[in-house]
Each structure stands twice: as structure tokens, then as C-alpha cells.
Image (cartoon, rainbow, N blue to C red):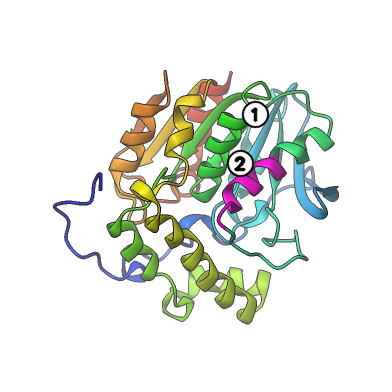
Amino acid sequence: RIGGAGWVRPRPLWAALRPGDHAPRGAGPAAAFGTSVTSAKVAVNGVQLHYQQTGEGDHAILLLPGMLGSGETDFGPQLKNLNKKLFTVVAWDPRGYGHSRPPDRDFPADFFERDAKDAVDLMKALKFQKVSLLGWSDGGITALIAAAKYPSYIHKMVIWGANAYVTDKDSMIYEGIRDVSKWSERTRKPLEALYGCDYFARTCEKWVDGIRQFQHLPDGNICRHLLPQVQCPTLVVHGEKDPLVPRFHADFIHEHVKGSRLHLMPEGKHNLHLRFANEFNKLAEDFLQ
């Protein structure tokens, strides 16, 4: 498999998460932000999807969180500081995550496609004519699928920490985060507060099984077959110190999404948009304008 050769067995993932890092694959502690952020739910595809919205700009942006993530845990600095005059910013909780419960989260073979349809249909229900996507980790995969399947609706896209396929190396990394009791307390506590200990632990295990199912498909395929169908301007951002998503994934997406740009952040980890929020926000704003 591409990128699968010449690697050493990774350390347990919680060892790679230093104090102040946020949770693996997209989830992280809540950030405080101003009262200009409104929260609501709307019926979409048979479920009540929760979202947060801020800003008054003509350019609509949807923020797509990572595994176990939600708008409030994953995108505090973006909801607070992205330009509210240029953009209307929406952060959603995918079904089974955050406050989009019930239902409980499950991981059928098409869960990324389901999230992509939910995301697009949510923004249509909110009466946005066209949107740009900022997708982190699993949210980046969802964004790629949405851009490929609904090209006339997606204006521009920024993704980071995403992968289009699963390798043996990836599968070992996922196993390293299966047991949430081994996560750092700083990473674990906000998610336990959001979900309760049992739901959090159970859903993380289900996620590991859900993401590993792609390893058994030809070429470990998640959405690699859809990348050539992406038509919107795309910025792929990668943190060179990401312990969860190796560089070859960003290179592959950049290579197969026509006309995309690749931006490397030498000190960036998986949560680069949180640790380097000002730099990331400016990068995203400059690209989206």
C-alpha cells in the first residue's frame, strides 16, 4: 500500500499527545467564545442536527469536526475569530456526535457519505445558496466527498488531517487510541463531560472499528476514487508533526485533487488550527476570499 513501507512501529498515541494537545482525530476541549454565536437544531434526513452560527458575511462557511467532535469542542477559535463581516460561519455536530443526539453514533460502511449528505442538506435547510467547507480530520474526508458529489454547491474547500484511504500503519495508529482510559486527562475530560464516560468510551471503540473497515477494501479505499471529481479550489494543509495522519496522505490528496494547493506547517500537529489558530485562520481567510 502507498506509504506503508519503511516505517517503525508508532508509540502509543497518548504518548504522542503532549499536555495542551487536543484529542485525537479531531475532538478537543471546548473554547470560550462570545455571545454572538447562536445555537439551534434543524430537522435533516430524519434526525435533529445541532449547529452553531456566527457572522453576517455573504460567504457561507461550514466547519466539519473530526471523530467524536462537535462545533463547540473543535472550532472555538474559528467561531470566535474568523472574519464575521466577510463570512457567515456554521459549525455542525454530525449525527450521533455533540448535541446531534439521538441517535447514537454508528459507523455503517457509508458513514462518510451519510455525513456528507447531512452536511450539504443542513446548509440547504438553512437557505445558503452555496458554501465553502473547512474540514478537519474525519471532517476533511466528509468535505472531500461532499465536494465531489455536490460540485455545484461547494464554492471552496480547506482540509487538514484527512486521508483518502487506510493503510496498515494507519490501522495501528487507530488501535492506539481505542482505549480512552489511556488518553491524557486534559484530552479526555472535556469529551467525558460532553458525552458521559460510557458513551464516549463506547463510541471511540466503535469509531476504531468503523474506520478500520476501509483497510479491508481494495487499496484501503475511503474516497480516493472521488478525488478526481472535486472541482472547487482546494487548499490542503498539513502539520509536519501530525502523529495521527502521516504526510503521504496530504501528498496523495494534493496530487489527485486537480489544481489543489498544499501548505505545510513545520510545527503543526493534528490540531494545528487550535494550536496555531491565528496563523491558520489567516491562511483560511486569504484562500477563501
Along the line of sight, which residue is nearer the eye, 11 or 53? Answer: 11
Report the span colored magenta. Answer: 109-119
- Where is residue 54? Give x, y as percent: 75, 38
**The stretch drawn in magenta includes residue 36:** no
Residue 32 shows in the view = no
Q: Nearer the viewer, mark 1 or mark 2?
A: 1
Q: Is the residue 275 above or below the residue 208 in the image?
A: above
Q: Main secondary structure of the magenta part?
A: helix
Outermost residue on the front side: it is 218
Under circle 2, the secondary element is helix
Q: Residue at x 70, y 48 (%)?
A: 92
Relative to residue 240, is residue 230 drawn left or right? right
- Where is residue 183? Give x, y as percent: 43, 74
Q: Is the residue 54 above or below the residue 31 in the image?
A: above
Label 1 belongs to which residue?
150
Q: Residue at x 34, y 27 (%)?
A: 255
Going by the numbered disc 2, the residue's amino acid type is Gln
Under circle 1, the secondary element is loop
Q: Residue at x 76, y 38 (%)?
A: 121
**The stretch drawn in magenta includes residue 112:** yes
- Where is residue 125? Give x, y as percent: 83, 37
Along the line of sight, which residue is nearer the eye, 241 or 66? Answer: 66
How packed mark 1 is, by other alpha carbons closer than 10 Å (few <14, some 14-19, many 20 or more), is some
Going by the numbered disc 1, the residue's amino acid type is Tyr
Q: Which mark is residue 204?
A: none
Outermost residue on the left side: it is 6
Label 2 belongs to which residue?
78
Relative to residue 242, is residue 159 drawn left or right? right
Q: Is the residue 263 above or below the residue 4 in the image?
A: above
How packed mark 2 is, by other alpha carbons closer than 10 Å (few <14, some 14-19, many 20 or more), is many
